[in-house]
Image (cartoon, rainbow, N blue to C red):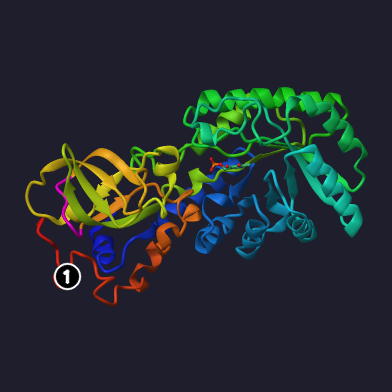
Amino acid sequence: MFDQASIEKFEQIATPFYYYDMELLGHTVDTLADLARKYDVNVHYAVKANVEKRILETVSSRGIGADCVSGNEVRRALECGFPADRTVFAGVGKSDREIYEAMNAGIEAFNCESLHEIYVINAMAAAFGLRARVAARINPNIDAHTHQYVTTGLFENKFGIAHHEFDTLAELLGRCGNIDFTGLHFHIGSQITEVGSVFALEAERVGEIVTYFEDKGLHVGSVDFGGGLGVDYEAPDASPVAPFETWFRTITGSYCRRPGQSLHFEPGRSVVAQCGTLVTRVLFVKSGETKNFLILDAGMNDLIRPALYGAYHKIENLSSCFRKGFSEMQAYDVVGPVCESSDVWGQGRLLPLSVRGDLMAIRSAGAYGQVMASRYNLRDFAPAVFSDELDSAPCYTDYFSMPASHPERSRGYVD
Ligand SMILES: Cc1ncc(COP(=O)(O)O)c(C=O)c1O
């Protein structure tokens, strides 16, 4: 994935940093936009996955809408070119200010997650003399066969409106005079890889729920299937673009679309994961009792997914490409510098013999990476570097930001 010129440029930049391949992102969103037209569906990029301005501008430039979960996300989406009437706003706990600002901006719909929220939005619309478009997020009670922390559509989950409240919901929508009911919204979980089976199940269940509300006399003008399409973390170069077509084909093939009804999708991870890489360096190599450790200068504060979910990210040694001759392979526990035992990038990873200063790539880091970074241990945020701005990326300026591989900097005894 990385050519020699890029890696040579990486050598000049202080690590860690997030590198975004803008060509791959452009290709991914072009593919997505073409397929949306082919299957006659609406796509809203789930902004939460990555909020970098250049990424949002690239996505919005292809006519894709936005799916937001906070007032700040709505504001950022609008600033980055997403039209208000293609921006939806979900989330279980919207504040009054967030509701007011989004209503005032004229967003496409509030995806409401409780009856209480619908009630409050209706009351606020009346108080401010505005109207609000509202979709009801339903909990369809489906097992997404994914990690427990990213499954959202099962019983007793905080997301969405549960089955026992369906009748009250229909009755409430009938008497809220200041909102326009647009349709139903679903989202069953994230990193779903059993695309054919899980999404077919979602589509069938959604069909039953739509029928239920139609029978109650509601017009369901739109159905939003949420996001959740998984990506290939094990082999990012083999599948740089997620299987959008299988996703759209599965759902449109399994759901009976009503005449005039619009269908919506909210991919986040699948749009941006593969274009992002966390570029880091080996600080130290250490032998434990039974294993070898590679200690990197990027940690769980930069990318929390492995520590939070035990998530897998492929790790590559970029510097080893330039070493002459056969590169011996070695198993390493690759860890970060943060003072937590869970700050581990991977255990027993087979990598070329690695030395202090080697550039390492933590792949598929574009989604839920930079957005979840923190300053834990008072560490600095890793900045973003874009492939089409590599030539103007800030180079190291002093001894301490100089790569450890630089001849002027001590490389230690290991090499
Ligand atoms: C309502 C909603 N839509 C879309 C998404 C995006 O999911 P993914 O990144 O898995 O596509 C999420 C993720 O949490 C979500 O909660």
Q: Above or below — where is 200 with respect to 385?
A: above
Is residue 194 left or right of 101 when viewed as pictured? left
Q: Residues within 10 Å of mark 1 (few under 14, many from 20)?
A: few
Q: Is residue 292 visible?
A: yes
Residue tagged 1: 409
Place residue 113 in its image quadrant. Answer: top right
Point out residue 334 in the picture as x, y percentages from the top left corner.
Answer: 27, 45
Q: Residue at x 44, y 38 (%)?
A: 309
Q: Above or below — where is 265 with respect to 215?
A: below
In the image, is residue 62 part of the stretch drawn in magenta?
A: no
**Foreground residue among 289 and 136:** 289
Q: Of all residues shown, which one is farthest toward the bottom?
A: 397
Q: Of all residues shown, which one is farthest toward the left?
A: 325
Point out residue 277 in the picture as x, y percentages from the top left corner.
Answer: 37, 53
Place residue 144 in its image quadrant. Answer: top right
**Foreground residue among 166 and 274:** 166
Is residue 44 left or right of 302 when viewed as pictured? right
Is residue 92 left or right of 196 when viewed as pictured? right
Q: Is residue 1 visible?
A: no
Name the amino acid, label 1.
Arg
**Foreground residue among 199 and 299:** 299
The C terminus, quarter of image: bottom left
Q: Residue at x 46, y 55 (%)?
A: 373
Main SS, magenta residues: loop
Count of labels in the image = 1
Q: Residue at x 56, y 43 (%)?
A: 267
Q: Which residues are magenta?
A: 352-357
Point out residue 237 in the picture as x, y percentages from the top left corner.
Answer: 33, 43
Which image quarter has ligand 1?
top right
In the image, is residue 356 part of the stretch drawn in magenta?
A: yes
Label 1: element kind = loop
